[in-house]
Image: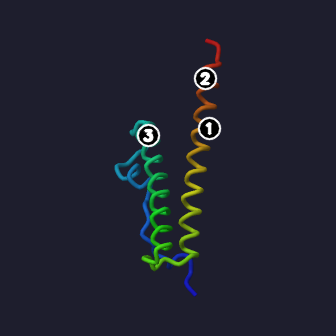
């Protein structure tokens, strides 16, 4: 039986590029958010591609690994939606402040 740590799938790493140069404080928020959105898109595309390959019988990825990929794509999308919701709530709170 394989353990979770021994499964090695080719998958995107969405936020690895944001921490490669050092401090995140030096990067503008727009680039971090853009990187997060690109990572979400990569997860979605990778999962969809794997589903297509499994349906056509061209992939050696098992159904359990495919389900994990789909769950990762779903969770990353939900995270992105929640971050967007928090940003909108923060924006509305700032706009409603009296000066």
Name the front one of labels 2 and 3. 2
The answer to which image quadrant residue 98 occupies is top right
Kindly identify the residue that appears in the image at 53 percent across and 78 percent down.
Answer: 62
Residue assigned mark 1: 85
Most foreground residue, 82 or 70: 70
- Which residue corresponds to mark 3? 25
Q: How many marks do you count on the picture?
A: 3
Q: Position of residue 30 (x, y in %)?
A: 43, 36
Secondary structure under the numbered disc 2 in the rendered image: helix
Label 2 environment density (alpha carbons within 10 Å; few <14, some 14–19, many ≥20): few
* Secondary element at image label 1: helix
Q: Is residue 29 rendered to the left or right of residue 67? A: left
Q: Quadrant of residue 45?
A: bottom left
Quarter of the picture containing the N terminus is bottom right
Asked whether the residues under the numbered discs 1 and 2 touch, taking CB atoms below 8 Å apart as contact, a structural biologist would say: no
Q: Nearer the viewer, residue 15 or 24?
A: 15
Residue drawn 50% across and 79% down? 6
> Where does residue 39 sit, x and y in percent of width and height?
45, 52
Q: Secondary structure at mark 3?
A: loop
**Image spot of residue 10 (x, y percent):** 42, 69
> Is residue 12 toward the left or the right of residue 95 in the image?
left
Q: Furthest-top residue in view?
A: 99
Q: Which mark is residue 94?
A: 2
Q: Kindly check if marks 1 and 3 are in contact, taking CB atoms under 8 A apart as contact.
A: no
- Mark 2–mark 3 Cα distance, whole angstroms, equals 21 Å
- Say which quadrant the C terminus sits in: top right
In this orientation, which residue lies closer to the viewer: 52 or 28? 52
At horizontal 43% and vertical 40% (from top left) the residue drawn is 25
Compared with 92, 21 (above or below) is: below
Q: Real-space Cα distance between discs 1 and 2?
A: 14 Å
Does 24 sit above or below residue 4? above
- Asked whether disc 2 touches disc 3, contact meaning CB atoms under 8 Å apart, the reply is no
């Amino acid at each position: 039986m394989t353990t979770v740590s021994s499964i090695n799938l080719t998958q995107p790493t969405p936020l690895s590029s944001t921490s490669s140069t050092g401090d995140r404080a030096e990067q503008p928020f727009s680039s971090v958010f853009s990187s997060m959105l690109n990572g979400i898109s990569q997860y979605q595309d990778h999962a969809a591609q794997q589903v297509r390959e499994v349906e056509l019988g061209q992939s050696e990825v098992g159904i359990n690994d495919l389900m994990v990929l789909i769950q990762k794509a779903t969770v990353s999308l939900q995270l992105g939606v929640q971050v967007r919701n928090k940003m909108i709530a923060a924006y509305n709170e700032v706009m409603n402040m009296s000066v």
